[in-house]
Image: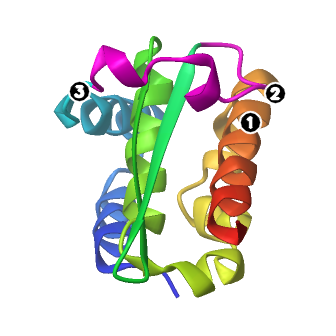
Amino acid sequence: MATEAFEEIAETFEFLDDWEDRYRHVIDLGKAMPPLDDVYKVPAMKVDGCASQVWLVPDVSDGLFRFEGDSDAMIVKGLIAVLQALYNGVPVAEVAAVDARAELGRLGLNDHLSAQRSNGLRSMVERINQVAAS
């Protein structure tokens, strides 16, 4: 059920044998994201449960879920980019059906992130699901 954008990331990861290369790729994905306007870096957009500062700004239009995001940590910004690839453009009614743990597991992220990063990633997915459900 992954989006085309997420499948592209998964295909790239298949060619990257070394986890350090994958880690760098995630960071590069974050660097390629446009910065979030400071007007959105407010407590209402902040994701609790992350070790670093994380903001997610959802947008539901035409029945499709999308979000912008940012973080003060490069790897986390890259994880936001991965989540954008996984969720952006998904019909809002189908967001809850996305098995983020399984999809991210395909990338090996479940095995290679610190406990704090894993908790933060889980918090971001929970926020996405909460917003889509409301």
- Within-10-Å neighbours for mark 2: few <14, some 14–19, many 20+: few
Mark 1 and mark 2: Cα distance apart in space: 5 Å
Residue pointed to by mark 1: 118
Q: Earlier in the sequence, mark 3 or mark 2?
A: 3
Q: Residue at x 31, y 32 (%)?
A: 30
Residue closest to the eye, 14 or 47: 47
- Within-10-Å neighbours for mark 3: few <14, some 14–19, many 20+: some
Mark 3 and mark 2: Cα distance apart in space: 23 Å
Residue pointed to by mark 3: 31
Mark 3: amino acid: Lys
Span highlighted in magenta in the image: 36-52
Location of the C terminus by quadrant is bottom right
Query: In the picture, residue 102 is in which quadrant?
Result: bottom right
For the residues labelled 1 and 2, say whether their Cβ atoms are less than 8 Å apart: yes
Q: Secondary structure at mark 2?
A: helix
Residue pointed to by mark 2: 115
Query: In the picture, residue 89 is in which quadrant?
Result: bottom left
Residue closest to the eye, 18 or 109: 109
For the residues labelled 3 and 2, say whether their Cβ atoms are less than 8 Å apart: no
Give how far across and how far down residue 25 sits, in percent: 31, 38
Mark 1: amino acid: Ser
Q: Residue at x 29, y 60 (%)?
A: 12
Q: Is residue 64 above or below residue 107?
A: below
- Tell me if 93 is positioned left or right of 59 in this view: right
Give how far across and how far down residue 127 sits, in percent: 69, 48
Give how far across and how far down residue 55 sits, in percent: 52, 28
- Tell me if 118 is positioned left or right of 26 in this view: right
